Image: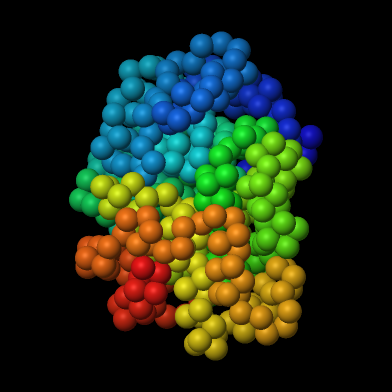
Amino acid sequence: MPTMNYLNTCLFDHGVLAQLPGVLKGLGVTKPFVVTDPGLKSNGLLDKALAALGTAPAGVYSDTPANPTEVAAKVAIAAYRASGADGIVALGGGSSMDMAKAVGLLATHEGEIAQYGATQGGMKKIRALPPLVAIPTTAGTGSEVSVGFVLILENGRKETFVSPRLIPLTAICDPELTLGLPPALTAATGMDALTHCIEAVLSLMPNPPAEAVGLDGVERIYRMGMLKRAVKDGGDKDARWHMMMGSYEGALAFVKGLGAVHGLSHALGRVSELKLHHGTLNAIILPHALAAIEAAGAAEEKLARLRRAMGLSEGARLSEAIAAFNEEIGIPKSLGAIGVKAEHWEGAKPYAMSDLATFTNAIPFGEAQYEALFRASL
């Protein structure tokens, strides 16, 4: 069983869910509060986690929405406080892990949560959270090792919260929890991980170790064909192992920042009536964002390194390779195909331009560039 100590302690292998009681004991948690979502409650994974826990948790919040909101976080924190819990277990994909981090922040910090957002200079205000253990059930967000989370505030902004103190103390990465994940969700979450790796490598912020980790993630997901294999066969244990590792690596890499793909994806993800999946948005937007970088003649050395990691020929266009890859794994062809309309641009524009990811994009991205990206993706 690999135990990796980078940003946190990560237990990684098939079957490591069984280590949950020992992990909690080591952190001094006797009354864990479990945060998950309705899908995991209905498909039996919540029951599997509770069985591994061995004793009844202090409480369970299982109503995490697909795009976590401040409204839902207030309901969850009320349940957490009423339960008398002394720690948190996040079970699920990025949404559940983000919600768990929001609960932890609200449990230990006073006032409105918005003041702790990155755009408000909130990082310096964030102190220690209750002990948090993250158990991913998808291979996409890497939130189990991420320094941040996103939350749709009551004012409509999809705010990013960033601090090393938001990293779960321990991650339990058990690829068996992703076996049988449907092909469409496997593809969407996998492309989320690949986008993290690619945008992190291209980010303007200097961090060679993070770039190296991102390139390894790209190689696993794309060149080794692990995402294609996982989409084709939901029971492929080897592919699921490598996809969970690629997801973990994507989050390790994006400590150096992301880019315009995430800026636009976050802005559109706040449109509540559409209920858009973050990974699907990233996948659709990624080839068009890469085309803009290629057209600008920017980041040539990094693009060359990405080509090598992907196994592409010298001079190949990453934008075209990713578009073809999307088609092969069944990603929708456009934003329009998932319900986005031209009129959504005006509402999304200010949120995209002010998103934290915009400021580390490989090339400068203002209103004109974002509108062109939106139109191309539409």
Q: How many marks?
A: 0
- Among all residues in the image, which is located at the extreme top? 55
Quadrant where the image shows the N terminus: top right
**Which quarter of the picture shows residue 179?**
top right
**Which quarter of the picture shows residue 233?**
top right
In the rendered view, how is the structure colored?
A: rainbow
Q: Residue at x 36, y 44 (%)?
A: 67
Residue 241 visible in the shown view? no
- Among all residues in the image, which is located at the extreme right? 1
Q: Is residue 104 above or below residue 336?
A: above
Q: Position of residue 287 (x, y in %)?
A: 51, 71
Q: Residue at x 25, y 43 (%)?
A: 112
Left or right: 358 in relation to 146: left
Quadrant where the image shows the C terminus: bottom left
Q: Residue at x 60, y 60 (%)?
A: 328
**Which quarter of the picture shows residue 322?**
bottom right
Q: Between 24 and 225, which is closer to the camera in this rendering?
A: 225
Q: Is residue 135 above or below residue 325?
A: above
Left or right: 364 in relation to 115: right
- Among all residues in the image, which is located at the extreme bottom? 297
Q: Residue at x 49, y 28 (%)?
A: 40
Q: Position of residue 13 (x, y in %)?
A: 74, 36
Q: Between 73 and 278, which is closer to the camera in this rendering?
A: 278
Q: Position of residue 116 (x, y in %)?
A: 33, 49
Residue 228 visible in the shown view? yes
Q: Between 144 and 335, which is closer to the camera in this rendering?
A: 335
Q: Position of residue 336 (x, y in %)?
A: 35, 62
Q: Is residue 153 above or below residue 307?
A: above
